[in-house]
Image: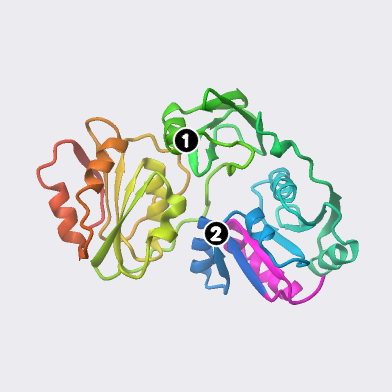
Amino acid sequence: MPEGCTIIAHGPEVFDTGDIVTVSAALLPEEFIVAGVMARTAAEESGFPCRFNSRPPSHVIRHLPPGTDAWLLNRGKTPASGEEFGRIVASRCDRPVYHIECSSRTVYGWNGADTCHTEEAAHRLGFAVAYRTADVRAQDNCMREIRGCIPGEPVFVNGIVVGSATGNTAVLAPENGGLRAVSGITLKPHGIEKLLRNGPVNLRNAWCKSGPVRSQSAQVAERRNPSGRITVIDHAACDIYSQMDATTCGVVSIGDDTTAVCGHICAHLGIPIFGVTDGDADTVVDHSCCSGSVIVEVTEGRDDEKGLEIAETVPTAQCHWDHWVSTTLHNRRDIRIVRDAR
């Protein structure tokens, strides 16, 4: 393995377990690029020096300079799901992929990866070596297999929970502009509705996963300055980092799972949230939030409509978060407070 390479780190687990430190000491890369939203949160909490990129790992790899080796670091929830993740990434890349999979302590060489580099990295880490060729089943837009599921856990498509796994492989197919369950999954109609708001989904290119987005609790920081701008996140927690900046004093999150993820991410940044929910959460992450946060549940209708109605009251100019929250809650009978951290 050439020293001074770049490693794309995926998922919060490589930071939460300390894998990132072990790999850095053994392989001496020049830099780590963090791919993914929750991975960024874990990286920020760890204090490990990284460069952040919100795009999926395959996108990051495809935009590396020509001739650059692609090194991927991951810890799947099981060895099988870890290998499956590497297969999907490699099937979408235009070059060989070196995949360091910590769940099975294996360095995979995908699609003709150099054997000397693969074996040198495995030797330094004390990992096994395996060579694989990524198939093209993930590229078939007629059907999409989401492998490595654990029955009962949530299944995501493009960051939205669309159902619950009933088997080890959830299979989806397009149907009349929407999705249908082929096997291994029970669909959640409200989730499908939210997913399709922006039009039909291309299953070939969709980001799909199963299970919680992070198993470790958030590190809750002291609250930021209560005055600034309020950001609205509507069922798209993956957009949160791109929507916030140094002036953000609070986040209005619409949706149960979106509120859980936004609360978790904002907790370590010291940013309170105003979560609008309707009680259909899927336990995708622990429900952390910092002081100044309020989570409400709608008593009439659904969080979609009520959340957008509340979002319309958010000032475009800077304001005081506590004042806006108090004003929003005043004399409302269509919502009830389920968590109050003020």
Residue 46 in the image, given as x and y percentages of width and height: 53, 69
| Count of picture labels | 2
| Quarter the N terminus occupies | bottom right
| Quarter the C terminus occupies | bottom left
* Residue stretch rendered in magenta on the structure: 1-30
Q: Residue at x 68, y 58 (%)?
A: 62
Residue 207 in the image, given as x and y percentages of width and height: 58, 44
**Which residue is under mark 1?**
199
* Disc on the earlier residue, 2 or 1: 2
Q: Residue at x 52, y 43 (%)?
A: 158
Left or right of 133, for residue 100: left
Which residue occupies the foreground of this view, 320 or 277?
320
Which residue occupies the foreground of this view, 319 or 213?
319
Q: How is the image coloured?
A: rainbow
Q: Judge whether residue 170 is colored magenta.
A: no
**Which residue is under mark 2?**
39
- Give the spatial CA distance, label 2 vs label 1: 28 Å
Question: Given the image, on which type of amino acid does mark 2 rest?
Answer: Ala
Which residue occupies the foreground of this view, 16 or 37?
37
Question: Given the image, on which type of amino acid does mark 1 rest?
Answer: Gly
Which residue is farthest right? Answer: 116
Q: Is residue 283 above or below residue 271?
A: above
Residue 256 in the image, given as x and y percentages of width and height: 37, 41
Residue 272 in the image, given as x and y percentages of width and height: 30, 59
Instruction: Label 2: state its secondary structure.
Output: helix
Left or right of 326, for residue 283: right
Circle 1: is it few (<14), some (14-19), or many (20+) Cα within 10 Å? few
User: On residue 277, which mark appears?
Assistant: none
